[in-house]
Amino acid sequence: MKTLSKVYMFLVFLFLYAPIAVLVVFSFNDSATMSRSVWSGFTTKWYIQLFNDQMLLVSLRNTLIIAVIAAVVSTVLGTSAAIGIMGMNRVTRKIVMNVTNFPMVNPDIVTGVSLMLLFVAAARFMGNVSLGMASLILSHITFCLPYVILSVMPKLRQMDPNLSEAAQDLGCTSIQAFFRVVLPQIMPGVVTGLIMAFTLSIDDFVVSYFTSGTTQTLPIFIYSMTRKRISPEINALSALLFTIIILLLIVINVRASRESKRADTRKGGAAI
Amino acid sequence: MKSKAAAYPYVVWMALFIIVPTALVVVFAFTDRSGAFTLKNIQGVGQYSNVFLRSIWLGAIATVISLVVGYPLAYIIAQSDSRRQNVMIMLVMLPMWMNFLLRTYAWMSLLEDSGIINRALGACGLPQIHMINTAGAVVLGMVYNYIPYMILPLYSVLTKIDRSVVEAAQDLGANSRKVFMRVTLPMSMPGVISGVTMVFVPAVSTFIISKMLGGGSNLLIGDLIDMQFLGSAYNPNLGSAISLVLMVLIFICMGIMNQFDENGATEGGAMV
């Protein structure tokens, strides 16, 4: 039984990682025929070509600009929304939460198409404006917002509602009370929301595909690469991205385990 | 914290970027190019019923395969000791962090007629198999991309099952098959349901996987919508009608699934 489950696990992980391994290995393939699957010697030329690809650099820059703006705006807007929603009465809260859940349940393609209709109509209304960075940023903020709210809300619920009132009784203005008392309490949720929004934005293809006009983001660039030219550059790009992701995950995990250790000792101290 | 006002910017935002665009989809679905009311678009969707059936069929197969393959893995992970659990869950999540276009592209180079799998078969003296541009390849792409969404909820439910309940069943004379069928499986139903929805919804509405792995002959609903908005068959009114039908379809599925979930929850409550 033990060996059987080990074999099973090995097979599933093989299925999950074989394609990625193939991508990485063939990013070093020196193939003159541009074939994706014949090995003809080691090279790093695809990586060099990648860094000289102007289109790639532009799309990477666009992706990062959009992700940073979308993450920051959706975190600020979402955190304040979460606080406001907590103060609402039952019925209003239920309605607002249903609207919040809507884009998460709705298929991405429908969200993309509906935003495209809106932006096309708005662009026509405003004259000769075409879709681009502005429509991308607006739509990314829109699909990030629910995730921010859903990661901040539980932290707000855990918090003692009297805390901020106590701070105000002690002479804080409500804004001071928010920054000095509430925000530090809900910070973990806010940070999670920010990170989620950032990664969602970087990774999004479907919504961007419909709202980008002619502007390229990294996923759209990758898409056009898979459609038009068969170049090992795309393998090099995947290998690079995969390495960055692994490094990021290691950093986050080390930080998280250090924090949980700290929390453990703190809890231990309290118990004593 | 009675600061409802903090949510107002968000409410305005969602009204503008969720409710208005969704309303636009509905309006477009029921009007023709000149803006007059018509039912022709909705009726026009009928001629694509084979595409709808194919999408639902392939999405359902992919969901069932993900469940059958993912459940044992989630079970094995939940049974192992906690430090290994974290590593293995990380390994399940890691491929999700890589752009799905790149992962799907990797399968293109594996499944091609002159691809790696066929070369390996040829090297072993086995006959080659035609895999790319078939419905099977599309299902494979769906399973590969979405199986983590099945494994993760299953795992989180399975780790929460109280060991002593399983032990009690064993003490009372149930063999391991009976324990699984009558205790573990019923208690993991909420995980099964959220896994099934999380795989089925994106699988039904995908358009990239079918484009990349299915060639032109395996059109899905997503491809149809894409074609109406950004493709050759430009007709946003028909596209909106198809999107609307897809949206309704998804919400009906979710409603049915939630029904199951509620039943499961009450049964679980009755059991305790």
Image (spheres, helix red, strand yellow):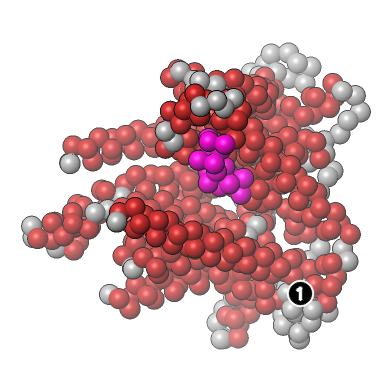
Decide if residue B158 is in sight here. Answer: no
Give the x, y percent position of residue B211. 67, 52
Give the x, y percent position of residue B171. 9, 60
Region in magenta? A180-195
Q: Exactly how many numbered labels are in the figure?
A: 1
Q: Residue at x 83, y 77 (%)?
A: A45
Question: What is the magenta segment's predominant secondary structure?
Answer: helix
Q: Quadrant of residue A7?
A: bottom left
Is A125 placed left or right of B35 in the picture?
right
Kind of element beneath mark 1 = loop
The front one of B246 and A198 is A198
The front one of A256 and B179 is A256
Please say if A251 is above or below B19.
below
Give the x, y percent position of residue B93. 52, 60
Which residue extends farthest front? A170
Q: Is residue B134 magenta?
A: no
Is B258 placed left or right of A213 in the picture?
left
Q: Residue at x 49, y 48 (%)?
A: B199
Query: Badge 1, how many Cα within 10 Å: few under 14, some, many 20+?
Result: some
Q: Residue at x 51, y 69 (%)?
A: A15
Judging by the rendered image, the residue that carries numbered circle 1 is A35
What residue type is disc 1 on? Ser
- Badge 1 sits on which subunit? A
Quadrant that contains the C terminus of chain B: top left
Decide if residue A226 is in sight here. Answer: yes
The front one of B136 and A41 is A41
Please say if B149 is above or below A83.
below
